[in-house]
Image (spheres, helix red, strand yellow):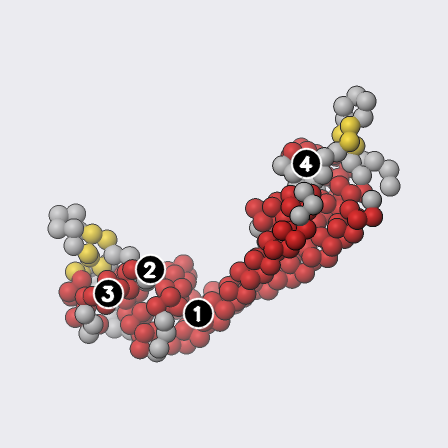
Amino acid sequence: MKSQRPVDLAREHGISAQSVRNYERDGVLPPAARTASGYRRYTHVHAAALRAFLALVPAHGHAVAGDVMRAVGGGDVDGALRLLDASHAQLLRDRETLDGVAAAARVLAAPLPPPVARAVPIGALAHRLGVKPATLRKWERAGILAPERDRATRQRVYGPADVRDAELAHLLRRGGYLLAHIAAVVRQVRAAGGPEALAETLGTWRERLTARGRAMLAAAGLLDEYLRTVDGQ
């Protein structure tokens, strides 16, 4: 294959020639040979590297993709594979979290008490739930609750959203869920805007994980193609 200019590699992917030069600068692409006049000349190896990197980004994220390519470029293929293993493990954890949140969403279908109209102190919230204040402090340490502090007294105060989160936590705790799991569920409820909206986000969340998994498959093929190209150059 004849040598190519940065613009030739860029055109295939709809990116700028400067992006190609930046990728080389950052170690994502191997160093390019130069003509007598100083112009970069890329080969089929660079083209394979660019395809692999751009496929790795949606699969594993920009930082991991760059680290993988730099590891390969430095001859540390095992190191690159370890990075990919860690990313696959994270995807599995995300799937397990999604499954747990989906299961918890069924518990959250139970009706909650009427919401409070204003912030309440820790004693009032503990009384509302029928738990001890120490329990609420424990939930705070677990990342389930994040109450504000009264400016004058520095005492914890729980707004309507905090009370809702505490009631969700209480409901899930009665269902046998561990605190770490409850914290993950509550974070998703906050992000969704409430337990009712959570159910609507689960399908989108699962679609994102599926898309990421399929991107990993595509990236693996292109990375293997790049490794074969390097081995055969």
- Crowd tier of the residue under label 3, counting other residues whose Cα lies within 10 Å: few below 14, some 14–19, many 20 or above: many
Measured in 3D between alpha carbons, the distance from the residue under mark 2 to the one under mark 1, in whole angstroms, is: 16 Å
The residue carrying mark 1 is 101
What is the CA distance from the residue labelled 2 to the residue labelled 3? 11 Å
Quadrant location of the C terminus in the rendered image: top right
- Position of residue 16 in the picture relative to residue 228 (left or right): left
In the displayed structure, does residue 180 sit left or right of residue 82? Answer: left
Q: Which residue is located at x 45 percent, y 71 percent?
A: 100
Residue 168 in percent (x, y) is at 32, 70
Say which label, 2 or 4, has the lower sequence index.
Answer: 4
Residue that extends furthest to the left in the rendered view of this protein: 153
Disc on the earlier residue, 2 or 1 = 1
Q: Can residue 103 be seen in this view?
A: yes
- Between disc 2 and disc 1, the foreground one is 2
Q: Taking the image as drawn, is residue 53 in sight?
A: no
Which one is closest to the eye, mark 3 or mark 1?
3
Numbered tag placed on residue 136 in the rendering: 3
Q: Which amino acid does label 4 sit on?
A: Glu
Residue sitting at x 57%, y 57%: 87
- Spatial distance from mark 3 to mark 1, Cα to Cα? 21 Å
Disc 4 designates what residue?
Answer: 24
Residue marked by disc 2: 143
| Above or below, 137 relative to 23 | below
Marked residue nearer the N-terminal end (3 or 4): 4
Dot 4 or dot 1: first in sequence order is: 4
